[in-house]
């Protein structure tokens, strides 16, 4: 049997296969009927075909997909449905929406058109899919002939700017609807890749998580999504827990704030990887160890007394600096020894450990150069923090080093870097590193400094948490203990997003705290952050009470201020089960 990701998008002639037979089906029927009649009213014809693709909630693994690390999302029931019809009479793309808030957009049929990023319009997301489809068809050798017009109506229920991936739901359903209109289909993993790449036409340098889960999701499962190549592994969540999604009511407009938020972090990660490669560990750390080394030399060498006195005898200035050095050495060693004691080693053990540490790091000087890469090659080959880990692992295999990730974190200083500092390390101007990416150049223009250590520390630790989450799910722990562990990992993930990656905001902090104060096993921001939703893991039996508590403690004051309407609360806070992925409907 072909693997799930190798199969094409399923095509159904009835709604039950996707929407089940409960209240969701009734709601879906109304939406499809409404789309049909609106299509007739706007275009004077019924649509040829429909496509739908869901939003998602990311359970763990935030801001690491674009660094090549696996993530663990699940699809939610909210989706984007698109009705479409080829129009040979009018050579134009007409894109309407069931929601009057989004006025009709028209675009030329030219698949090579540029998207006007300075003038953001909701219809741009459809054009991402349109361009992506043509680029992909061309790469597959499919002859598309002359471009024809398309009539399109969109109905989306994924709240926008909420971290639930309304954008990917839109781009994926657009791409799949266009494919269906032209009667072609491809394996899901290829569509996941193509939609990820084409959403970048909107100007955000997204990773592939949202499109992958939207295209490949299965009812009842979260998915571990791996990249390069894209792959989805089913994750059956433990019984007795439910994920509740709650909107912070702060909207994050990613397409508009990209240069300071999302793309800024992508650029910082890239700079962290090139800087880690070109930082000479020895030069970076040796000042810390000089005193200890001198002291060790003094106590271990039999000639030490003579040596010391000859140093001390070289005149006033030298004498005091030598004394200074010895004092430093004593303090440095005392610290190391205390450290070792704390770790239950003897003081000799501490010194041995220290020497081993130094020897280990000596091997790790300038990874890129050691690996025989030229500077320029390294800059163009090492794009992500997972590439750096890959280099470390292969380097470590041949040199017996233990934890390459820690070694790389060691290569980046805690304080923010200036442009000049990074250029001095890499020997390249930042402008030239990013010359082919105008959105990265926008980031450079807007940024004052770059927090490389913090961003890399988040990415590496979050990548580990994703695997810990997956391992906990498949361990022999009881369901209750599994849920507890998942909750803890979610809390740690939030801390890392908030403190190291700085992608939270006051509203999300308040909401996450309220979730935890009201017995959530864990709670974290989900999606890109800077607004949008939190996701909380809650014991199933307490979900109704939990939601009531959130209403009272977070939403009521917002209702009183008129920020949201009481009747709309269900749109902002709801429990979610893993839903199914993209589908085509032909009736
Ligand atoms: P949102 O903003 O939730 O759609 C974005 C990216 C993801 C991922 C997350 C952070 C897009 C389309 N999606 O999701 O790829 O990087 O942020 O984990 O840009
Ligand atoms: Mg998005």
Image (cartoon, rainbow, N blue to C red):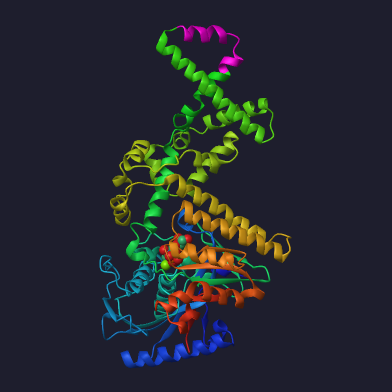
Residue drawn at point x = 59 percent, y = 38 percent? 397
Residue drawn at point x = 56 percent, y = 74 percent? 549
Q: Position of residue 413 (x, y in %)?
A: 44, 39
Q: Tally the numbered discs.
A: 0
Residue drawn at point x = 64 percent, y = 32 percent? 340
Q: Is residue 515 magenta?
A: no
Q: Position of residue 221 (x, y in %)?
A: 61, 70
Q: Main secondary structure of the magenta part?
A: helix
Screen quadrant of the N terminus:
bottom right
Query: Is 41 in front, or is 540?
Result: 540
Q: Give the side of residue 98 with respect to residue 457, left or right.
A: left
Q: Range of the magenta residues?
A: 297-313
The picture quadrant for ligand 1 comes to bottom left
Residue drawn at point x = 68 percent, y = 71 percent? 240
Q: Give the side of residue 343 with respect to residue 424, left or right.
A: right
Query: Is 404 in front, or is 393?
Result: 404
Q: Position of residue 401 (x, y in %)?
A: 59, 36
């Amino acid at each position: 049997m072909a693997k799930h990701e190798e199969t094409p998008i399923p095509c159904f002639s009835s709604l039950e296969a996707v929407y089940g037979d409960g209240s969701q089906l009734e709601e879906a029927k109304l939406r499809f009927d409404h789309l049909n009649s609106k299509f007739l009213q706007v275009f004077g014809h019924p649509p040829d075909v429909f496509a739908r693709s869901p939003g998602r909630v990311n359970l763990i693994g935030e801001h690491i997909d674009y660094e090549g690390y696996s993530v663990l999302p699940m699809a939610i029931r909210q989706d984007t449905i698109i009705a479409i019809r080829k129009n040979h009479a009018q050579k134009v793309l007409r894109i309407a929406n069931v929601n009057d808030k989004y006025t009709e957009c028209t675009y030329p049929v030219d698949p090579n058109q540029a998207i006007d990023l300075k003038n953001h319009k909701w219809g741009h997301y459809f054009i991402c899919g349109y361009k992506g489809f043509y680029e992909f068809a061309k790469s597959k050798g499919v002859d598309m002939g002359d471009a024809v017009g398309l009539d399109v109506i969109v109905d989306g229920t994924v709240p926008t700017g909420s971290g639930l991936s309304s954008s990917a739901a839109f781009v994926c359903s657009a791409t799949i609807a266009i494919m269906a209109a032209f009667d072609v289909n491809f394996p899901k993993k290829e569509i996941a890749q193509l939609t990820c790449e084409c959403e970048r036409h909107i100007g955000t340098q997204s990773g592939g998580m949202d499109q992958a889960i939207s295209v490949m999701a299965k009812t009842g499962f979260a998915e571990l999504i791996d990249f390069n190549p894209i792959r989805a592994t089913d994750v059956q969540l433990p019984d007795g827990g439910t994920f509740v999604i709650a909107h912070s009511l702060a909207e994050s407009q990613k397409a508009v704030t990209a240069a300071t938020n999302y793309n800024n972090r992508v650029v910082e990660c890239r700079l962290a990887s090139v800087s880690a490669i070109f930082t000479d560990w020895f030069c970076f750390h040796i000042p810390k160890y000089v005193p200890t080394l001198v002291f060790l030399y003094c106590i271990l060498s039999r000639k030490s007394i003579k040596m010391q006195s000859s140093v001390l005898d070289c005149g006033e200035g030298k004498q005091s600096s030598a004394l200074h050095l010895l004092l430093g050495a004593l303090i440095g060693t005392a610290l190391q020894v205390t450290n070792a004691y704390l770790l239950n080693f003897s003081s000799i053990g501490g010194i041995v450990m220290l020497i081993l540490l130094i020897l280990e790091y000596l091997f790790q000087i300038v990874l890129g150069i050691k690996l025989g890469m030229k500077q320029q090659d390294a800059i163009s080959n090492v794009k992500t923090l997972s590439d750096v880990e890959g280099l470390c692992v292969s380097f470590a295999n041949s040199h017996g080093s233990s934890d390459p990730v820690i070694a790389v974190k060691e290569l980046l200083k805690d304080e923010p870097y200036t442009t000049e500092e990074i250029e001095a390390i890499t020997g390249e101007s930042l402008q030239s590193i990013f010359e082919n990416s105008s959105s990265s150049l926008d980031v450079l223009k807007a940024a004052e400094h770059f927090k490389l250590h913090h961003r890399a520390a988040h990415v590496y630790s979050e990548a580990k948490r994703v695997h810990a989450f997956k391992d906990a799910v498949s361990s022999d722990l009881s369901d209750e203990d599994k849920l507890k562990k998942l909750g803890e990992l979610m809390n740690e993930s939030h801390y890392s997003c908030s403190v190291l990656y700085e992608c939270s905001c006051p509203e999300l902090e308040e909401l996450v705290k309220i979730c935890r104060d009201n017995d959530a096993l864990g709670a974290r921001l989900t999606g890109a952050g800077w607004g949008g939703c939190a996701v909380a893991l809650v014991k199933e039996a307490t979900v109704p009470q939990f939601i009531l508590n959130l209403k009272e403690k977070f939403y009521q004051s917002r209702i009183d201020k008129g920020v949201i309407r009481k009747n709309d609360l269900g749109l902002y806070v709801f429990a979610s089960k893993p839903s199914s992925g993209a589908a085509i409907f032909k009736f």
